[in-house]
Image (tube, grey):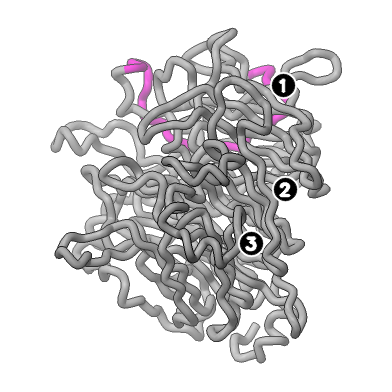
């Protein structure tokens, strides 16, 4: 397909865009178009002026890029700002748009957003953004929404137009009142990714970090907002008003709300009001979209420690995922910590963990910082079970946590799990029956403990994903690795059939992989957003806002890769 087509014609032949985390309001991460191959770096752009390194790890969560149907890529960029006193403020955010086909910058919105968790206090939180349909005088456009100060949202009416209007919307008051009292409202923060329902509404969580005017007492300590991007009307409900009990105080940081398949319910993950680095027992809640009443809630329990809660951490970037049959999957940590596996918990649409016969739904043996992706069972040739879909999740075995589990050997994998069966699967630590592994692929690059230079390998580099895009037509998935490469995992052969070096091996806070409407593949590695494909027309293009990859670094990283 020629990239010289007029924009309107181009839009008419492209696949749908990628609206928010996990690609849609259910976060299933399924791509239905025709993807390109992992041949070349078409363009790339930096996402951070000040990457937070701990050894060779980057302590930052980055928002999933989103892509409009007309192939405009919108992503987050953190920049350093020099204060009047000469100090540096690292907590500054841009929303940037680039043309998907060549990386040319289309527009930039500088925000005044302040993240709930920021280094050196803790890992940098996700900067909330999404695309959303906006109805205006000239019809429906694909707008872009992002978080701003005081829990407000900036809405750009047309993400494909550099000159379209930009509006600030406060969900709890008028724009005039917000402008007059912005300092008083500063403790209100958006703390989750933004979910777009495709019908002009966005969903997000907020927290209240300090005292606000008594007139806003209904905000409680945190809650959920539904906002219309066209008429700017909003509705919210505090966690206290949800009535779920258990001392819940907020939606978990970084956990995007998920909608039921019919759009009438919204699922959220709740935890106590947590300070950075803290953990607490988790709840799931199901709210009616029309009334914001709580239809169901459940305390998340640890399958390996009967009677004790599973734990949610604000460092996690896992979100609820709603499967085609309405089942809800959510990752949580173990009650007694141990090795960093956690669980992929499963509920029906009413948040029951058991079926009509009282049988407990199978759980996955990894999940605390991962959002499961949906893999239709009919694209996995060797699957002979009856499940209509499988789950793609990370399936790591962290050897660097062997002080808590001496049997850990660093076999870091990504796996396809059968959510209907646990007849053969057993959790290594607890002996609990877990979802059967249909097939898995092991990381291929040796890993080393950076604190012990020259020591032996501690397994293999892990897969650097919190949501992996499933390429249905090519029966594969695009998965990002901490060895600096992005891979295509082919389900038919169960092999890594394509790979592309992006950066030297870097431990990265879990990131998403995405495919745009023209088939371009997007991956984040070492705080850089890469657009990868096989388009022979567009030469590789680099943004000025990125440290160039040196030939020496590339040579060293490539040498570390085991041959496919």
Q: Which residues are magenta?
A: 404-424
Q: Which mark is residue 19?
A: 3
Residue 403 in magenta? Answer: no
Percent position of residue 321, x then y: 66, 41
Mark 2 / mark 1, whichever is N-terminal:
1
Element on which disc 3 rests: loop
**2 and 3 marks in contact (CB < 8 Å):** no
* 432 to the left or right of 530: right
Q: List the single residue furthest toward the right.
A: 356
- Is 140 placed above or below 187 here? below
Residue 405 in magenta? Answer: yes
Asked if residue 24 shows in the view, the reply is no
Give the residue drawn at x 41%, y 46%.
Answer: 116
* 449 to the left or right of 297: left
Mark 2 / mark 3, whichever is N-terminal:
3
How far apart in space, not on screen, are marks 3 and 1 (Cα)?
30 Å
- Is 176 placed above or below 542 here? above
Give the residue drawn at x 46%, y 68%.
Answer: 95
**2 and 1 marks in contact (CB < 8 Å):** no
Q: Which mark is residue 379?
A: 2
Percent position of residue 367, x then y: 53, 32
Give the residue drawn at x 64%, y 49%.
Answer: 225
Looking at the rendered image, the disc whose residue lies closer to the viewer, 2 or 1, is 1
């Amino acid at each position: 397909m020629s990239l010289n087509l007029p924009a309107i014609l181009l839009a008419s032949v492209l696949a749908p865009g990628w609206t928010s985390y996990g690609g849609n309001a259910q976060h299933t991460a399924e791509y239905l178009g025709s993807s390109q191959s992992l041949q070349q770096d078409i363009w790339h752009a930096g996402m951070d002026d000040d990457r937070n390194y701990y050894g060779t790890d980057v302590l930052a969560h980055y928002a999933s890029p989103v892509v409009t149907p007309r192939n405009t890529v919108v992503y987050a960029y953190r920049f350093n700002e020099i204060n009047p006193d000469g100090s540096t403020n690292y907590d500054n955010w841009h929303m940037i748009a680039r043309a998907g086909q060549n990386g040319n910058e289309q527009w930039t919105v500088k925000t005044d957003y302040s993240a709930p968790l920021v280094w050196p206090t803790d890992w940098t939180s996700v900067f909330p953004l999404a695309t959303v349909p906006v109805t205006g005088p000239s019809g429906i456009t694909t707008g872009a929404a992002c978080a701003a100060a005081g829990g407000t949202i900036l809405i750009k009416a047309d993400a494909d137009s550099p000159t379209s209007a930009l509006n600030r919307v406060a969900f709890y008051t008028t724009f005039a009142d917000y402008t007059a009292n912005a300092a008083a409202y500063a403790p209100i923060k958006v703390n989750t990714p933004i979910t777009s329902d495709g019908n002009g509404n966005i969903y997000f969580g907020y927290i209240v970090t300090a005292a606000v005017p008594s007139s806003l007492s209904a905000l409680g300590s945190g809650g959920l907002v539904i906002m219309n991007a066209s008429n700017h009307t909003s509705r919210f409900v505090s966690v206290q008003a949800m009535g779920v009990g258990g001392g819940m105080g907020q939606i978990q940081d970084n956990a995007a709300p998920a909608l039921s398949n019919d759009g009438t319910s919204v699922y959220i993950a709740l935890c106590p009001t947590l300070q950075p680095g803290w953990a607490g027992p988790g709840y799931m809640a199901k709210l009616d979209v029309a009334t914001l009443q709580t239809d169901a809630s459940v305390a998340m329990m640890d399958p390996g420690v009967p009677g004790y809660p599973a734990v949610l951490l604000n460092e996690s970037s896992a979100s609820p995922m709603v499967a085609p049959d309405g089942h809800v999957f959510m990752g949580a940590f173990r009650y007694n910590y141990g090795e960093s596996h956690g669980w992929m918990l499963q509920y029906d649409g009413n948040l029951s963990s058991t079926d009509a016969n009282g049988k407990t739904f199978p759980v996955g043996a990894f999940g605390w910082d991962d959002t499961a992706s949906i893999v239709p069972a009919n694209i996995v040739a060797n699957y002979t079970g009856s499940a209509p879909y499988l789950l793609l999740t990370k399936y790591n075995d962290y050897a660097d946590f062997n002080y808590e589990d001496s049997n850990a050997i660093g076999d870091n994998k990504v796996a396809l799990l059968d959510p209907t069966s646990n007849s053969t699967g057993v959790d290594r630590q607890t002996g609990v029956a877990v979802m059967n592994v249909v097939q898995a692929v092991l990381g291929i690059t040796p890993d080393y403990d950076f604190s012990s230079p020259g020591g032996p390998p501690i397994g293999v580099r892990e897969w650097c994903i919190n949501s992996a895009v499933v390429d249905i037509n090519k029966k594969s998935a695009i998965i990002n690795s901490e060895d600096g490469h992005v891979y295509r995992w082919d389900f038919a052969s169960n092999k890594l059939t394509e790979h592309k070096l992006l950066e030297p091996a870097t431990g990265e806070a879990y990131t998403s992989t995405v495919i745009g409407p023209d088939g371009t593949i997007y991956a984040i590695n070492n705080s850089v957003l890469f657009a990868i494909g096989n388009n022979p027309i567009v030469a590789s293009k680099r943004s000025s806002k990125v440290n160039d990859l040196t030939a020496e670094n590339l040579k060293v990283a490539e040498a570390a890769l085991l041959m496919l």
